[in-house]
Image (cartoon, rainbow, N blue to C red):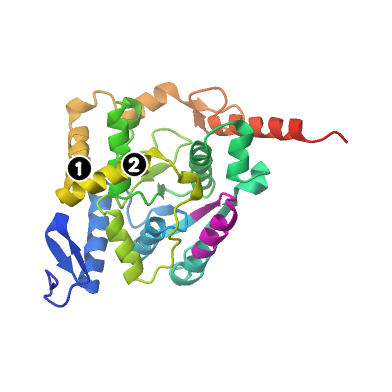
């Protein structure tokens, strides 16, 4: 198998593109796909300050690596969830990348530790407030990413969601016709009002397999294990279904998600913009001042419940 571009020996084949690449041409392909996503969705420019949400996994570390190599000003935030050995290992991977590759580009790593603020790791916190661990994790991450982006005056926040992630999420939302989530599944979500940072997904044109290959070929040391809290998540099932379809018909995920984006971009599909809807329904949280549809945002409610349950469970002195 030879490289489609330079005809030397290929290291990876991409059936959905009917192509194969050597390491050098594959890196160019990955960088070009990311650059095309950034430009087509008007995500950010070379003068913008970007905050990358990193977890220690292949996608987020690959995103940080790609943005730095493309010449963007990209720092990162890691949220330590306190999941025992898993968090220790993921924290180590992020720190190693920050101290080597990122430091060479003058980039900074911010770290937030859930246990320091909540008094418990994500598993214990979820049990305290009687909520699923993934839901609790999502609330905390969204809040902290937005908080750090605003406090440090970043222009945009970038996450490592890839084509597989977005196609699986779309499948779940369509199966339940969750229109409020479908409205917000674009790769670029504007800062619709003061208090919300702009959010982008520069890797939506690249598959999970392609990003794993990029990380291996570029010696990015990432945590391979899935988060232990994700066991049984519906998203994993949706990915398995889509992987089966992709095997039988290469390009299925791309056609599904990109087709959705194409229809979503048509004017008749959105008579009112998401920004207009947000401005009509959101206002500052009475506790932390971040935007919410209620008087108190879900994060502050969660922290208050955790403190109440924690206090009531303490033995009397």
Instruction: Judge whether residue 83 is colored magenta.
Output: yes
Q: Are marks 2 and 1 in contact (CB under 8 Å)?
A: no
Identified at 34% across, 48% down, the residue is 201
Considering depth in this image, is 46 or 301 the residue closer to the camera? Answer: 301
User: Is 14 displayed left or right of 300 in the figure?
Assistant: left
Q: Is residue 187 visible?
A: no
| SS at circle 2 | helix
Q: Which residues are magenta?
A: 77-93
| SS at circle 1 | helix
Q: Residues within 10 Å of mark 2 (few under 14, many from 20)?
A: few
Image quadrant for the N terminus? bottom left
Instruction: Judge whether residue 23 is colored magenta.
Output: no
Upstream in sequence: badge 2 or badge 1: 2
Q: Quadrant of residue 258?
A: top left
Q: Is residue 307 visible?
A: yes
Q: Residues within 10 Å of mark 1 (few under 14, many from 20)?
A: some
Q: Residue 189 appears at what percent x and percent y?
A: 35, 39
Residue reaching furthest bottom?
8
> Closer to the observer: label 2 or label 1?
2
Image quadrant for the C terminus? top right
Label number found at residue 258: 1
Q: Residue 203 appears at what percent x and percent y?
A: 30, 52
Residue 101 in the image: above or below residue 185: below
Identified at 64% across, 30% down, the residue is 305
Give the residue number, with chain letter if any, for mark 2.
237
Considering depth in this image, is 64 or 114 the residue closer to the camera? Answer: 114
Identified at 17% across, 45% down, the residue is 252
User: Is 228 displayed left or right of 210 in the figure?
Assistant: right
Label 2 – label 1 distance at C-alpha: 21 Å
Q: Residue 25 appears at what percent x and percent y?
A: 20, 70
Q: How many marks?
A: 2
């Amino acid at each position: 198998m030879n490289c489609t571009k330079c005809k030397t020996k290929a290291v990876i084949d991409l059936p959905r593109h009917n192509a194969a690449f050597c390491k050098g041409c594959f890196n160019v392909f990955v960088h070009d796909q990311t650059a095309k996503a950034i430009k087509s969705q008007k995500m950010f420019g070379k003068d913008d300050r970007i905050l990358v949400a990193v977890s220690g996994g292949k996608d987020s570390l690959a995103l940080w690596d790609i943005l730095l190599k493309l010449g963007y000003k990209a720092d990162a935030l890691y949220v330590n969830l306190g999941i025992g050995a898993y968090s220790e290992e993921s924290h180590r991977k992020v720190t190693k990348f920050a101290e080597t590759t990122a430091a060479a580009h003058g980039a900074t790593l911010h770290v937030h530790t859930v246990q320091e603020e909540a008094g418990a790791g994500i598993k214990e916190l979820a049990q305290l407030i009687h909520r699923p661990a993934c839901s609790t994790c999502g609330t905390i991450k969204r809040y902290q990413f937005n908080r750090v982006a605003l406090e440090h005056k970043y222009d945009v926040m970038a996450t490592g969601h890839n084509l597989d992630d977005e196609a699986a999420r779309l499948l779940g939302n369509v199966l339940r016709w969750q229109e409020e989530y479908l409205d917000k599944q674009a790769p670029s979500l504007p800062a619709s009002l003061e208090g919300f940072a702009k959010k982008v997904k520069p890797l939506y044109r690249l598959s999970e397999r392609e990003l794993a290959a990029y990380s291996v070929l570029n010696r990015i040391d990432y945590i391979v294990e899935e988060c232990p809290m994700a066991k049984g998540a519906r998203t994993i099932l949706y990915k398995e279904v889509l992987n089966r379809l992709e095997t039988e018909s290469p390009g299925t995920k791309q056609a599904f998600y990109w087709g959705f984006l194409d229809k979503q971009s048509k004017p008749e599909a959105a008579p009112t913009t998401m920004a207009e809807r947000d401005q009509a329904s959101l206002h500052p949280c009475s506790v932390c001042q971040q935007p919410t549809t209620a008087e108190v945002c879900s994060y502050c409610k969660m922290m208050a419940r955790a403190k109440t349950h924690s206090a009531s469970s303490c033995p009397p002195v």
